[in-house]
Structures are given as C-alpha cells and as structure tokens.
Image (cartoon, helix red, strand yellow):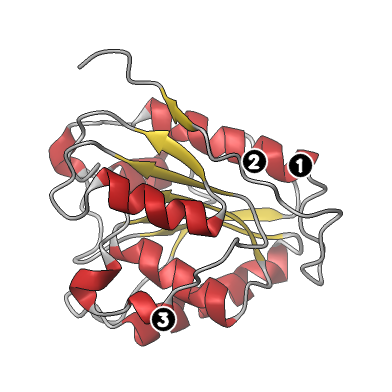
Amino acid sequence: MKVPKGLQILTVPGLHGSGPGHWQSRWEQRFPDWQRVEQHDWSRPSLPLWAERVSESIMRAQRVAPRGAILVAHSFGCLATLRQAALDPEGIAGAVLVAPADPDKFGVAGLLPAYRLPFPTILVASRNDPWMQQRTAFSWGTLWGSELHDAGMLGHINADSGLGQWPEGLALLDTLIQRIEADGSAGPSGDRAGPWDGGLEVSSTFPYI
C-alpha cells in the first residue's frame, strides 16, 4: 500500500495492546514506516491518558508528515482517537475506526464528540461483536459522519477473529486514503479544501452469513 507523501499512518490499539496475531501488528510488520501509538499502561483504560498519547504521536508524526496522520484505531483505541478529535482535531487527516469499544461501558460517552467530525472516517463494526452491538456502533458513526461498514460475523475484529493480514481492512484504509486525496486532504494548518461529507449508507464486503 502506498501512503501519499506528507501523510503518516498511526495504529491505535485497544486495551492490552495488539499481540503478534492481531491485524494491527501484522500491518506494522508489513509496513515498517507505520507507527504505533504506545500507551504507558495497556491494562488501564484511562481515556484522558490514552488521548494524550494519541496527541503526542500526532505531533511527532507532523514533524515528518505535514499533511497529518491517518489513525487506524481498534476498540478502546477508537475512543482515545475520538477523544483527541474532540479536544483538537488538527493534525488528523482521517481515521479508520474498527470495532469501537462501547463508551457507555467505560462511562466516557460525554467525553466523545456528538457531531460530524471535520475529517473523513470509516467505522467498521461486526454483527456479533461482544463489546458493542453493531446498531449502537452505527448510531455513533452516524453522529460522527462516518462511512459505515458491515464487517459480517467477525466478533471483535481482533486476533481471535482469525483475520490474518485482513486484506479487507487494508482495502478500507486505501479507500479512506483515496478520499483524503480527493477532498484536498489536510494542510499544515489542518485546513481542508472543503467539508467532509461522509455517506451514511452501510457498505459490506461480507457476501455470506
């Protein structure tokens, strides 16, 4: 996958980090230029602390990628990404939000944006995620202006889902990159050529049950 000049991919794992079998870890191994947002304590889901680490990683990325960072987040990492977007969206060129954790279960719903985000996002949710029902994830995604993607029966879309390199996820990331390019992308100041208009139609590459 080719990342356009001036953009940096940041992976944002969830609680306990992503082990070697997780698609995030496999992508990082395959694309060594991509960077991981590291947490001080992967076992402590503190939204303020995790969002601060996201912020620090975005600032570092901007030193070499003036157009900003594309965040590829999973589970609680999605919530940390969204919290940072609520605090300061500058430097975020776009985000793929995979199997977000349920904000209500962590008592942080009020800390997340409840409006259309100023950058393109794709929200990916499965039909049998034990951590958040798909319809709840899609309701949040609608607020954020995300493109909604039905991943089928993939559980929490993690290492236990047996995804390997998860080529469908890479295809979604590539779609997001193309939309960032088409929208004029983010400049050094975070300004964009025009407003992002996320389609709310649910897409799916899962043709079978």
Image quarter where the C terminus lies is: top left
Q: Which residue is drawn at 81% across and 72% down?
A: 189
Q: Which residue is drawn at 59% across and 33% down?
A: 175
Q: Are marks 2 and 1 in contact (CB under 8 Å)?
A: yes
Which comes before the other along the chain, label 2 or label 3?
3
Looking at the picture, how far across and down is residue 57, in whole percent?
52, 73
Which residue is nearer to you in this view: 124 or 198?
198
User: For the residue carrying disc 2, how many other residues have a C-alpha within 10 Å: few (<14), some (14-19), or many (20+)?
Assistant: many
Q: Residue at x 24, y 71 (%)?
A: 104
Which residue is nearer to you in this view: 55 or 76?
76
Which comes before the other along the chain, label 1 or label 3?
3
Label ID, residue 177: 2
Mark 1: amino acid: Glu
Q: In this view, does 186 lie to the left or right of 133?
A: right
Label ID, residue 13: none
Say if 141 sits above or below 111 in the image: above
Q: Distance between the residues labelled 1 and 3?
A: 30 Å
Q: Mark 1 highlights which residue?
A: 181
Q: Is residue 176 visible?
A: yes
User: For the residue carrying disc 1, how many other residues have a C-alpha within 10 Å: few (<14), some (14-19), or many (20+)?
Assistant: few
Residue extending furthest right?
A: 193
Residue extending furthest top?
A: 208
User: For the residue carrying disc 3, how many other residues have a C-alpha within 10 Å: few (<14), some (14-19), or many (20+)?
Assistant: some
- Which of the two discs, 1 and 3, sits closer to the camera? 3
Looking at the picture, how far across and down is residue 98, in whole percent?
36, 48
Mark 3: amino acid: Leu
Mark 2: amino acid: Ile
Looking at the picture, how far across and down is residue 131, in whole percent?
17, 55
Identify the element where label 1 is drawn. Answer: helix
